[in-house]
């Protein structure tokens, strides 16, 4: 749990998650089950591979668009950075385009859940 996040049992008791933790706090059997999927989603291969080049293009494109928007509208740290990372991870892992508006809404909900769900 990254050494400081303790999930609130009351908030998570109906979730069927055991232990009450993020994936970094998973048990060895849980880790063994999920790791192959996560490796498949996030392993880029060598620098000359098609996947590496594809992801490099995705990241470069998202960051260029992000910096262009932020130059015009200003930068809100950390929320703008969190929204950008949410967009990039969704595109890389799931090939899913997330609008900036949806990414910002996600960041708001994520922050509220973390605040409510931890002790």
Image (tube, rainbow, N blue to C red):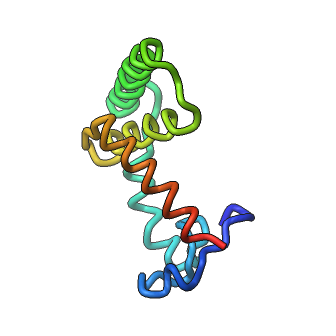
Return the x and y of residue 78 as percentages of the image width and height.
57, 37
Q: Above or below — where is 3 with respect to 41? A: below
- Of the 4 image quadrants, the one containing the C terminus is bottom right
Task: Single out the residue that lies furthest toward the left.
Answer: 96
Residue 6, position as x, y percentages in the image: 66, 72
Residue sitting at x 55%, y 71%:
117
Extreme residue in the right direction: 3
Residue 99 x/y as whole percent: 28, 36
Image-based side of 98 in relation to 13, left or right: left
The spot of residue 23 in percent (x, y) is 53, 66
Task: Tell me if residue 65 comes above or below residue 41 in the rendering.
Answer: above
Which is more toward the observer, 54 or 15?
15
* Residue 95, image quadrant: top left
Please name the residue shown 57% across and 73% down the image: 21
Could you tell me which residue is drawn at 59 percent across and 65 percent down? 24
* Quarter containing the N terminus: bottom right
Q: Nearer the viewer, residue 80 or 64?
A: 80
Asked if residue 45 is positioned above or below residue 74 in the image, the reply reads below
| Of 32 and 103, the residue lying toward us | 103
User: Which residue corresponds to the image point at 25% horizontal and 38% vertical from the top-left?
Assistant: 97
Q: Is residue 57 left or right of residue 39?
A: left
Please state if 40 lies on the left or on the right of 26 as rendered. left
Please tell me how many numbered marks the rendered image carries.
Answer: 0
């Amino acid at each position: 749990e990254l050494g400081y996040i303790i999930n609130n049992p009351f908030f998570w008791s109906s979730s069927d998650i055991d232990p009450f933790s993020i994936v970094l706090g998973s048990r060895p059997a849980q880790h063994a089950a999920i790791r192959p999927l996560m490796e498949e989603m996030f392993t880029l291969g060598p620098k000359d591979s098609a996947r590496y080049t594809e992801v490099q293009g995705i990241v470069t494109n998202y960051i260029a668009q992000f910096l262009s928007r932020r130059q015009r509208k200003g930068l809100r740290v950390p929320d703008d950075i969190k929204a950008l990372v949410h967009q990039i991870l969704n595109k890389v892992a799931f090939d899913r385009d997330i609008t900036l508006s949806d990414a910002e809404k996600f960041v708001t909900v994520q922050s509220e859940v973390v605040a409510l769900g931890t002790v």
